Amino acid sequence: MSYYQPRRRGNFIIDERFVGRSIEVYTIDGDKLMGLIDEVSNYEIGMLVENTAVIVPRSSIAYAITGQSDVHGYGECCEKDFVLDEEFIGSDVEVKLINNTNISGRLVKALRNEIAVAFQNRAYVIPRDGVLYIKILRRL
């Protein structure tokens, strides 16, 4: 009998599986950081940007762009905590961010702290804290 309990996936789309992957991170003040993810924690993301180590607090991220195939799998969201949950996956949405950016596409993932919207070949990973509102344009 094993007492090992599998570790439950976190509340973030950008987690340890992203280490070594290329990503574009846009901060709430408009900066763009492009590089490789080196380390991931609950509160920060460590990146290599032009051979320089950069630590980005998750609270300063407006959104991140990665390949659509990087946002895969199923994650447990937040039944009863949020209206926007797994039932909206596949819906066409328009997301208005606190930095006045609009992102439109198809909702592909919704976790407790982040959502992912796919548009063309890219996935936009958006912290829920940075969302002003979400329009559901077409629900599946």
Image (cartoon, rainbow, N blue to C red):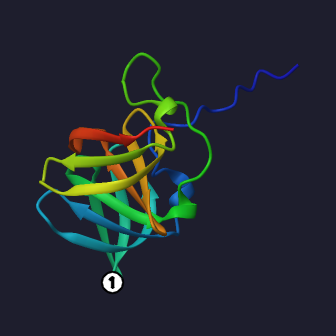
Residue that protrudes farthest toward the top in the picture: 80
Q: Please give the name of the residue rendered at 29% of the width and 48% of the height, measured from the top-left corner.
A: 94
Using the image as rendered, state which of residue 30 and residue 46 is in the foreground: 30
Q: Nearer the viewer, residue 17 or 83?
A: 83
Residue 81 left/right relative to 88: left
Q: Quadrant of the N terminus?
A: top right
Task: Give how far across and how far down residue 13 sits, in percent.
Answer: 47, 47
Observer-nearest of 69 and 34? 69
Residue shown at 61%/40% (left/top)? 74
Percent across and percent down for residue 96 are: 20, 48
Asked if residue 104 is positioned above or below residue 89 in the image, the reply reads below
Q: Is residue 55 left or right of residue 15?
A: left
Secondary structure state at the residue bearing disc 1: loop
Furthest residue to the right? Answer: 1
- Which residue corresponds to mark 1? 50
Image quarter of residue 63: bottom left
Q: Is residue 58 visible?
A: yes
**Percent position (x, y) of residue 8?**
60, 31
Question: Which residue is rendered at x = 36% and y = 83% of the image?
Answer: 51
| Amino acid type, residue under disc 1 in the picture | Glu
**Would you place residue 23 above or below residue 126 in this image?**
below
Q: Quadrant of residue 42?
A: top left
Residue 4 horizontal side relative to residue 24, left or right? right
